[in-house]
Amino acid sequence: MSDLESELRSAVRGEVGFDVTARALVTMDASNYRRVPLGVVAPYDADDVAAVLEVCRTHGVPVVARGGGTSIAGQATGAGVVLDFTRHMNRLVSLDAESRTAVVQPGLVLDRLQEAAAPHGLRFGPDPSTHSRCTLGGMIGNNSCGSHSVAWGTTADNVRELAVVTARGQRLRPGPGWAGAPEGLRGLVEAERARLRTGFPELPRRISGYALDALLPERGADVARSLCGSEGTLAVLTEAVVRLVRAPRARALAVLGYADEGAAAEAAAALRAWASSRSHGTGSGAGSGADSGGGPLTLEGMAADLVPTAAALPRGGAWLFVETGGESEAEARARAEAVVRAADVVDSLVVTDEAGQRALWRIREDAAGTATRMPDGTEAWPGWEDCAVPPARLGAYLRDFRGLLAAHGLRGTPYGHFGDGCIHVRIDFDLLTRAGVGRFRRFSEELADLVVAHGGSLSGEHGDGQARAELLPRMYGEEMVALFERVKGVWDPDGLLNPGMLVRPAPLDAGLRFAVLPREPVDVAFGYPADGGDFTAAVRRCVGVAKCRTETASGPAVMCPSFRVTGEEEHSTRGRARLLHEMLAGELVTDGWRSTEVRDALDLCLGCKGCRSDCPAGVDMATYKAEFLHHHYAGRRRPAAHHSMGRLPEWLHWTARTRTAGLVNALAAVPPLAWAAKRLGGIAPERRIPRLATRTFTRWWRGRAGAASGAGDLVVLWPDTFTEHFSPEVGRAAVRVLEAAGLRVALPPTLALRRPPVGDGRSTVLDLRQVLRGRGRVCCGLTYVSTGRLDRARAVLRRTLDLMEPVLQAGVPVVVLEPSCAAALRGDLPELLHDDPRAARLASLVLTFAEALQRLAPRWTPPRLDRPAVGQTHCHQHAVLGDDADRRLRQAAGLTGELTGGCCGLAGNFGFERGHFEVSVACAEERLLPSVREAGEDAVILADGFSCRTQLGQLAGARGRHLAEVLADALEEG
């Protein structure tokens, strides 16, 4: 390995990584398989690719090309050297709007091509659901399709010419008319013409095997097309010329409801036939590159068992998503309504606004992740992800498929491209035990036979890889598969490229990624209730869908801000999950919880919890980070920031008790003293230390004893650390608004009542020991959790539950103003104290400020401001709490405009820690700061989180305000 690494470093301009982290990040793709590479190279250009192949051929080391790593059959993993094209070879080389072509490098993400083509009214036709992170190289390698293939065909239909390097270093330009064919290929194919003319099933989604029929003279002898779907086993792609199509000016989405998936499948076939019979249809798509016309652009299906909530969908047990295009919204809608009339539906919905369509498409696109959990929480896995049959046979195939599942005692959730007869499904295979793996093999063999019996293809989109290649003889016969092997020998005589895939495959049940994980539960602090208390199962949630690798945030999305800043896989949610997986495996990462590789990857996790809601599989990396830090630093010296900011409630409590806030502020204003304090506390030198309030919120509260209060429902207002010590004006404003809404406000008890109330229920027997200890303060434990001091967090939370006992018994709602604290009480508290039923009780009582007004004062009308609002929805509110009530409250108050998504970048202690400043600023510059700079002078800058307000003040000189402050000011103004 050292010789190989040294020679590669000398030969290439790009990065060479043979370290543990670089290798661990690419051990898996989105499949069930795992292969540990020797190293990873990020080539700078085609010369680097040729140099890597030459060095590896000399050493007899295999080479695997990798794009976004979202392949589902195992073809993006390798035991030799992995080529990562996403780092450097990721450019759009050129775009010619007149000829409707683009020249792309293999690492270019599809969405970047779509963004460049859109101003010209063009787009690339195929669009997998992973369009925000899949690469053109990976799409060509797998011959990807996507939801619009009924209109614009597969990737192969939209490729004109390729530039490749063969395993022996030959540079070729494959295209039509035998262009770029290696020596010997033409003679081999011409000798087998009869077999090629009869040996391939005719269907829209035949992806399995090599597309050798593209080399027939009647099909143009197109060498480029024959390489599409070869999964990097024949040559390494360095550039491609792709065809673009005209995009419709307007679109409409018809959602058609059916009784079940069988009815939806039969309807899809009927609608496809109906569309093809219309003279103004879109064309067959296959190879035509046809522009949008009057027929459906999509015919996507999904069943109810895949949808978390069907509230946004029409009535039915299954749905078809049928998109139509037009020159205007009216034309697109008219065509969608024509589709509805032609379909025999239970119910239907036609949507023309872009936001509504995006929300509905998100349900469908997230299916690859949401399907990884059955409705009861059981894990489900790929492996038979995308079989395809002729569309007219899809209904019958689905019925037989369901029967086969039942015969094996398995469950699955079919969805996918019904119009093309292609079905995606995740199945609840038991891949952890020998018996379960055996059933996986038997089911796979029988399903392959079923697909072939219906005239189908084992792969209809994602390729064969290791998952299906072993079964190709059942589809093609031994002689055709032998021909595939001979073609492989012409292109790659040394078997250097992606061995074990497609030809001479590894067994479909070998190298499963779960085999290396521990069988016994890992001792952990959190309860992981959604994963049966098993941390290993929690880590297994990451199936590699890689939505966290989306390069630009859109809408309300948050995940994953650190990846969008650095572009490094190790700073994505998937990358961190991969390292945790390898830590549990103990083969590559060998020092367990003490791993520096895992620690360093988690260091830039902001704890925003965006993945908790935005990841389709529900990965919660903030919790995993806290868990890891808890074990990593057990019995060891912690970083200074864990003491200065992790114990922040303690320091601030003593400052308040000694009335020294003014002194602390004065000392922090002296530059040398501030510098020394920041250095000792592990605080970024670029940061200003926030000023403390000289009068805390609870001191103000005690000073207003006897003041007027509402006569309505009682609420307990939570004095969180940030409101108490930094922003008491937020607490005062909240009291003003809540009382104006008719609610009675109280603060949590400060004495733990060891015995219940007696007599009339008002008097209480106090515990003398508790009185002697002094007053206590409730705390959500957030700072302890975020720094992994989970033992301390548990102690603090148990004390809080003791103090809150009367509130819990009375069931009084608890209003929490700071979103991160509310999220900690709703999420972290019951998961950390899963053995204490009071934790779940308190979590259920927590309300945000807007929720309290909506639920407890529904008739109250807020003052009208009629002003635009800008700012950012707090990331914890987006991920854990939800912001529907806030939206309604803003609307009622006349605050117009949408708040941005993303993360402010400060994220509690993250942005204050030394070494995080640049990333913190870059996160804020992504969406928050631009939205504030572009706002008009009359705009209200909303920021409910103390971190968000601090970031705005320190980076933009802008004063963000809590919604409670804005409403309280409006009340004062009458």
Image: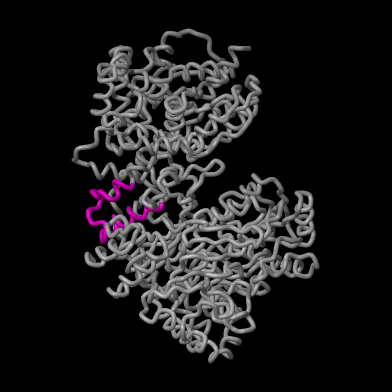
Task: Pick whichever, 162 or 576, lies toward us.
Answer: 162
Is 697 positioned to the left or the right of 965 in the image? left
Tell me the quadrant of the picture where the N terminus can be found: bottom left
Is 565 positioned to the left or the right of 227 in the image? left
- Look at 32% across and 69% down and name the residue there: 80
Q: Which span is picked out in magenta?
A: 574-601
Q: Is residue 79 magenta?
A: no
Quick check: can you spot residue 736?
yes
- Look at 53% across and 9% down and name the residue there: 708
Q: Is residue 587 magenta?
A: yes
- Image x and y of residue 22, in percent: 32, 57
Specify the principal SS of the magenta part.
Answer: helix
Is 320 positioned to the left or the right of 134 in the image? right
- Look at 40% across and 79% down and name the residue there: 492
- Look at 55% across and 28% down and name the residue there: 850
Task: Pick whichever, 608 or 941, lies toward us.
Answer: 941
On the image, which quarter does residue 6 sit in? bottom left
State whether residue 865 is above or below residue 136.
above
- Image x and y of residue 537, in percent: 37, 55
- Image x and y of residue 698, in percent: 40, 15
- Image x and y of residue 754, in percent: 32, 24
Task: Pick whichever, 437 or 878, lies toward us.
Answer: 878
Tell me the quadrant of the picture where the C terminus can be found: top right
Quick check: can you spot residue 543?
no
